[in-house]
Image (tube, rainbow, N blue to C red):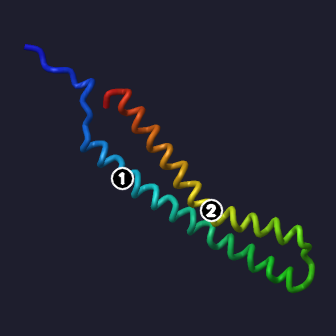
Amino acid sequence: MQTPSRQGSIDHESGVAYGFYMAIAGILLAAIVLACFGPVNNAILDFCNDEIEGGHMSVQTKAAIGWNVAAMVWAPVLVLIIFFLWAIVRALEQKRAGS
């Protein structure tokens, strides 16, 4: 008697566990990115505030620095999106490989 093929079956427990671990890892990765960008962001803002008080900074420079600060704030969100997409691709690769 032959054993049934496992090609069509899905191991839901492994998928849930993998998704849970990837969610935790993604949140930790975003926290690390935010923690690393925090001191840099504060240093840039302190420097810019000193330059603005001294009148050494133009309106265009202020706008450019504001955009860069906003980009630093959104960096963890971008990391989470990329990590989420990577986790989906990785899960699909595992499914295709039959693991």
Q: Is residue 34 above or below residue 49?
A: above
Pointer 2 or 1: first along the chain: 1
Name the quarter where the N terminus is drawn: top left
Q: Is residue 53 above or below residue 42?
A: below
Residue 84 image position (x, y, % from top left):
48, 49
Name the quarter where the C terminus is drawn: top left
21 to the left or right of 42: left
Residue 9 image position (x, y, % from top left):
24, 29
Q: Please name the residue that numbered disc 2 is placed on.
A: 74
How packed mark 2 is, by other alpha carbons closer than 10 Å (few <14, some 14-19, many 20 or more), is: few
Q: Please name the residue that numbered disc 1 is placed on.
A: 21
64 to the left or right of 79: right
Residue 71 image position (x, y, % from top left):
69, 62
Residue found at the very far top of the displayed protein: 1
66 to the left or right of 79: right
Residue type at the position of mark 1: Tyr
- Find residue 81 and name its label: none
- Whole-angstrom CA distance, mark 2 to mark 1, is 23 Å
